[in-house]
Image (spheres, grey):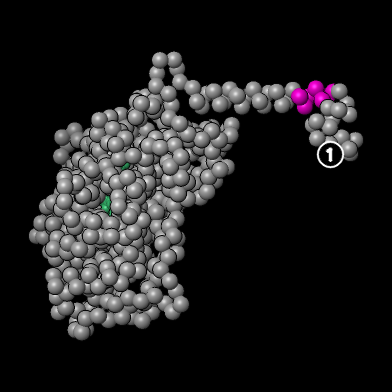
Amino acid sequence: MASNINSTWSEQLLTGNKHDVVVTTGVIVIVITLFISWLKKTNSTPRGTAPLPPGPNGLPLVGYFPFLGPNLHFEFGKLAQRYGPIFKIYLGSKIHVVINSAELVKVATSEQDESFANRDPHTAGLAASYNANDVAWAPNNTARRNLRKVLVHEVLSNMNLEASHSYRRDEVRKTVKTVYDMINTPVDINEISFSTVLNVLVNIVWGKGLVEGTKFGDLSDEIRHVVSNIVEIAEGLNISDFFPVLARFDLQGVKRKMEDQMKRFDRIFERTIEERSGSMSGEIEQKGKQEGKKDFLQILLELKDQKTGSSVSMTQLKALVVDIFLGGTDATSAMVEWAMTEILRNKNVTKKVQDELAQVVGLNNIVEESHLPKLKYLDAVFKESFRLHPPLPFLLPRAPNKTCIVGGYSVPKGATIFLNVWAIQRDPKYWENPSEFIPERFLKNEGLEKWDYSGTNTKYFPFGAGRRRCPGIPLGEKMMMHIVASLMHSFEWRLPEGEEHDLTDKFGIAMKKKKPLVVIPSQRLSDNNLYM
Ligand code: HEM
């Protein structure tokens, strides 16, 4: 018996019990048949239609999962080299299509933008968006388009951005003061920029008066906790997203944990609305009127009061606030960290950034938002940092609402689409010396190439392209430029003894540095008052 257990199938065939051999052979035949029919299913297309894109086969049920490392952007970069501008890959039971060329991204986000403007929300995204009632995860329907209009034309309008400039100024100044108090001790750049950006957004959404009032001192801490927790939960890989049949079991508890955070968020929202409609309302409204700015809550209450049949519901507005926090904080602070890393590891770049700041701002002054458009070299540094380290290396996943043809291949309705901005922005076909950090490439005005964040040139689109591109660009850009300009203008920075700069990244909700940038500041400006 023991020898039977240890023997191989072929040994049993030669020596063993006939019944065992029949059973084993039967199982093997079934497995091979399943495998062949799975191969046929994953590679076949109905007669007369275009074929599916090429791609690795993987295994039944789990697809290509077992062959992938944790850094999907590297893995997909390698597969792009093998399979070309478009490939398909099964992850679990879901088909994913990865688009790796500027030309085909143009097809998806311009020629066929309407079909590709739908999303494929994962469990965490769904739970954090009140079931896709927001802008970022909702399908491309009328409700979403209306809500996006509220975000672009009300919250982020030029007038509101201009009016809220004092919020950004105050928070950046507070950060400079905090760093000044930490002179000669290590500072975690991502940590301080995350908290600066979050405070700015809290003020934009809820209004400074509400958060700073003594009664609500604890509110911004609570918001900070909830936002950090939401980012952390959304960051992990969730098996249910790849095996939809398992979703209802919520094996890793992602849905439950996210819903707990959303309940906390609901309580914050209810409390602020209650207070706003109560005793503090007149005072805050009056202050807002004097300063010519409206916080988000005020816009919300006005929309409700208009009674014009506005289709924006309370749930949508809450979901939009979460979008603003999630979209705004993580990606912006990740970019501050990448830009600071690239500046500090290239001595030549450090000098050029500092020289420009000395010339535009002066060393007896502080950085103001009005200086930012004149900092052309720093702008090029950001553009080059975005090229090498796009915080969302595949953007947010899309899902076409009908089967489309891209590059001669069939892209099935509902497939998860990754637009591989990471690979395109490093492709030697489009970029000279692609892995080198050369900000000057964005200062040349040769030819007809347009390098901006609009996504119209699909060789460079770190904020996305087409009708789902990021609506937060003007705010994100102002915040990250102001923070880095101020940190570089007010301080000299050095690494702790024995440390070296490290560019390793880690895949997540926003692609960050694996090892946080922790650097030691020293005073650069002679006037101590410029730090107060
Ligand atoms: C450096 C900062 C930022 C980066 C790199 C960034 C990047 C992106 C990217 C790549 C997308 C997906 C675009 C696509 O699928 O084509 C996106 C979407 C979005 N971002 Fe940003 N973002 C930033 C800041 C912000 C800010 C400050 C806000 C809000 C105030 C924001 C709100 C959103 C929203 C709501 C969406 C979903 C748009 C839609 O689906 O229609 N982002 N962002």
Asked if the magenta segment contains residue 23, the reply would be: yes
- In the image, residue 31 lies at what x, y percent? 67, 27
Instruction: Identify the residue shown where x is 40% and y is 43%.
Output: 125
Going by the numbered disc 1, the residue's amino acid type is Asn
The one of 105 and 159 positioned closer to us in this rendering: 105
Compared to residue 231, the image places residue 113 above or below, namely: above
> Looking at the rendering, in which quadrant would you find the C terminus?
bottom left
Left of 467 or right of it: where is 446?
left
Magenta region, main secondary structure: helix
Compared to residue 339, the image places residue 8 above or below, namely: above
Asked if the magenta segment contains residue 43, the reply would be: no
Instruction: Identify the residue shown where x is 45% and y is 31%.
Output: 54
Q: Which residues are magenta?
A: 19-25
How crowded pointer 1 is (Cα within 10 Å; few <14, some 14-19, many 20+) is rated as: few
Determine which residue is flagged by label 1. Answer: 6
Q: Residue 121, located in which quarter of the rendered image?
A: top left
